[in-house]
Amino acid sequence: MTPQGDSSSLELSISVIVPVYNGGANFILCLTSLAEAVSPPHEIIVVGDGDTDGSSELAEEFGASVIRLPTTSGGPALPRNLGARQAHGDILLFIDADVTVPHNAMSQVVETFRSEPNLAALFGSYDDEPAAPNFLSQYKNLHHHYIHQTSCEEASTFWGACGAIRREIFLASGGFDERYRRPSIEDVELGYRLRRAGYRLRLCKGLQVKHLKRWNIGSLLRADVLYRALPWADLILRHRRLINDLNLRFSARVSVLLTFGFLCSLAVAWRWPGFLLVAGFLILLLLSLNLPLYRFFYHKRGLWFALRTIPWHFFYYFYSGLSFGLGATLYLLRTCLPCKNSAVARLQTNDLLEKESRNGRN
């Protein structure tokens, strides 16, 4: 499916949409980077999601159009949709309030859409220079950068932190699913719908934004497990579609299996020490499979940083596997129980009809 018209012959305009809830200092940097863009967008629309720190007023000082929600919606889906409905640009560029964009971001987006008239949407990645200096922030954001930079450019999903889509396609598709009440996988779900409708999506590896968020153990686990892994498992099972790309690539799935095999072998080795050899073999396979990533960490931050990422990466595979299993269980319980109740109801109905039939014959 292709958009209407030949966009290659038109001057495309961009509407930047930024949802914000108490953006703080990071939001100032975000607005500053947008204001300093070499090719400024047609408009910047900021949706204040019940913010109480003056973020909306700050956006107005930068010349942005502001939509204010009286109370927070809890996630970016609703604010993004509200901004999109007010936008006038040909292209909607969604930017998170805790990222900064490069000077040439707008020209990259316009040029890509102009050169590919049948392209529906595109998205970029985090760069390899995360702002927060602590270990977890560096690990998390560099891992994200690596995953995007080594994935297929013909994409199977979408990314809302820096993602652009043709306005008419976004509105026709219904926008982001507002049932996601936390910063979750509303962007992934939109990408799934777009691909199912036959639209082309592209991962533009040259479009890189800087993530300003500081991660700690609690925020990392909460985001990865509650807001990503569990709803993503539900989405995969609903769509019956497990893509071999990004975080779901085949090597990642094998790594999850190897991680659990290694842990099970260690547990069994308490009774049968021979399983230590099995555990050692599995850990070697796991290290070998992920060696390109650890080599990337080494080149970016040195040997000590790369060594420290290994246990965290194994832990990532562990809780990702557990989360998917839990998400799949919850999905099956939710979908199978109604089926069971329907079957019971059918049996009861059939019994009642049979009794009525017997009474009629008598």
Image (spheres, rainbow, N blue to C red):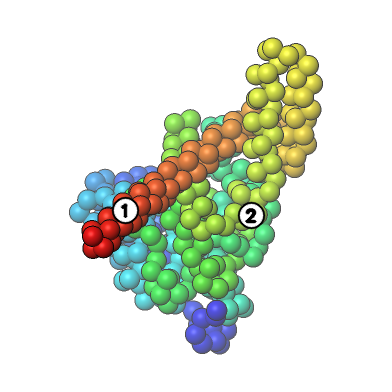
Mark 2, residue position? 245
Q: Is residue 327 visible?
A: no
Hey, what amino acid is under mark 2? Asp
Q: Quadrant of residue 271?
A: top right
Of 212 and 337, the residue lying toward us = 337
In the image, residue 351 sits, relative to residue 154, either above or below, namely: above
Q: Residue furthest left?
A: 70
In the image, residue 165 sits, relative to residue 334, either above or below, namely: below
Hey, what amino acid is under mark 1? Asp
Of 56 and 153, the residue lying toward us = 153
In the image, residue 341 sits, relative to residue 92, either above or below, namely: above
Which residue sits at x=64%, y=31%? 260
Q: Earlier in the sequence, mark 1 or mark 2?
A: 2
Report helix, strand or loop for mark 1: helix
Q: Is residue 324 visible?
A: yes
Residue 264 position within the rendered picture, expressed as x and y whole percent measured from the top left: 65, 24
Which residue sits at x=46%, y=62%? 190
Residue 107 position within the rendered picture, expressed as x and y whole percent measured from the top left: 55, 70
Mark 1, residue position? 351
Dot in front, 1 or 2 = 1
Residue 51 position within the rendered picture, expressed as x and y whole percent measured from the top left: 26, 49
Can you tell which mark lies on residue 271?
A: none
Which residue sits at x=44%, y=31%? 218
- Position of the N terminus, as image quadrant, is bottom right
Of 341 and 17, the residue lying toward us = 341
**315 left or right of 178 in image:** right
Instruction: Count residues near mark 2 (Cα–Cα under 10 Å), then give few for <14, some for 14-19, many for 20+.
Output: many
Residue 9 position within the rendered picture, expressed as x and y whole percent measured from the top left: 55, 87
Report helix, strand or loop for mark 2: loop
In the image, residue 345 sits, relative to residue 158, either above or below, namely: above
